[in-house]
Image (cartoon, grey):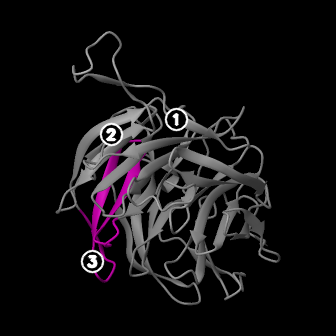
Amino acid sequence: MTDTQDQADEQRVYALTNAGEGNRVAVFTRAPDGTLAPLGSLEPFPDLPPDAGAFFYQPSATFATDGLGTGAPFNSQGALAASDDGRYLFVINSGSNEITSFAVTGTGLRLVGTVSSGGVGPRSLTVHGDLLYTVNGFGLGSIQGFTIRPDGALTPLAGSNRELGSATSEPVQVSFNPDGTLLVVSELFANRISVFPIDANGQPTGVTENPSAGESPFGFAFNQRGQLIVSESFGFRRNASAVSSYAVSPSGKLSVISASVPTCQTATCWIVNTPDGRYTYASNTGSGSISGYRVGADGVLTALDADGRTGLTGAVSLPIDMVINGAGTHLYVLNQGTQTIGAFRIEDDGGLTLLPSVGNLPAISLGLAIS
């Protein structure tokens, strides 16, 4: 396998350690049944015959980003992002205000380079074609664009930096819409979802500041129909969280489809959609659970479970970031409290069946990506 070979034959899941003394990416490989194992770490127990069938996991393979994490948790969805073809992985270094590029290789990751994020404290990344944008969240928040060179290196896109509407907005996530014509930022404290139209040169041409349907918009995800689904943490009040869906106009104006459909859970923050757009899932950090919704063709949300507990990660698990594999068969969630990545099989009816977890991650880890 070459350094930049497409990884379709071996899917991997990545998490960011966010360590203040030196940020790293932990790499896990994905088996056909959806279970994960740390890259290159499956070894027989000592002093057992080779055919005993018992195995243990060494600490996960990690790769230095050449930058710094914060050494503490912060509000973020999308701390890592893979290129569209899976050949490159991009990660934030919030402690040193940088973004790192890696080439995905047969043995792990190869460092390509590190560049300034164009602001203070990058929170999130998004990729569309040869464009990458980040949102910087500490101090006066801003977005910054980059072009992705053929070797995976990043070049700042002149004239792409835009400040957000207020210095206390607390941006959480940035993401392109499916066709790359809009760039969306969720602003937790401002109760706002800002949308920047992007022109053919990758430049923002303005901004539409949309009020959130519910309090404290956090993570979000577009489905394949271009509908936007957003989690709402409602100030992290107990069992008060919700999820909303929107139609999005070409100018970036949001129209509410389903407003604040309750999860009946606490601190609903991260969100992910199945590739076919039939289901959306939100992780409830304060409740140790995942809430599932059926998504109609018109974008209407219907809770799969009246109590909001479609999947359980555990009382002290603190589930945060999630990803779904390309076939839409498995969901992975970073459990910050137990320092593991949990795995679920997604059933035909949207239900979640728990699979074994894998871990030994730092408690300050954040972000998941799959390629």
Q: Quadrant of residue 173?
A: bottom right
Nearer to me, 351 or 132: 132
The amino acid type of the residue labelled 3 equals: Gly
Query: Which residue is tagged 2?
Result: 313
Contact (Cβ within 8 Å) of mark 3 with mark 2: no
Residue 296, label in figure:
3
Q: Let me know if residue 205 appears in the view.
A: yes
- Residue 296 vertical placement versus 85 (above, below): below
Choose between 81 and 238: the one closer to the eye.
81
> Would you place residue 252 above or below residue 162 in this image?
below
Image x and y of residue 274, in percent: 33, 65
Q: Residue furthest left?
A: 349
Asked whether residue 201 is drawn in magenta, I would say no
Q: Earlier in the sequence, mark 2 or mark 1?
A: 1
Label 2 secondary element: loop
Where is residue 358 shown, x and y percent of the image?
38, 35
Residue 288 in the magenta stretch? The answer is yes
Q: Which residue is mark 1?
A: 61
Q: Could you tell me if residue 171 is visible in this image?
A: no
Residues shaded magenta: 274-303
Q: Residues within 10 Å of mark 3 (few under 14, many from 20)?
A: few
In the rendered structure, which amino acid carries the disc numbered 1? Ala
Position of residue 79 measured from the top left corner of the image (x, y, whole percent): 59, 53
Side of 113 relative to 109 (left or right)? right
Image position of 151 (left or right of 88):
right
Q: Give the residue at the far top of this rendering.
A: 47
Q: Residues within 10 Å of mark 2 (few under 14, many from 20)?
A: many
Q: Does residue 171 appear left or right of residue 53 in this picture? A: right
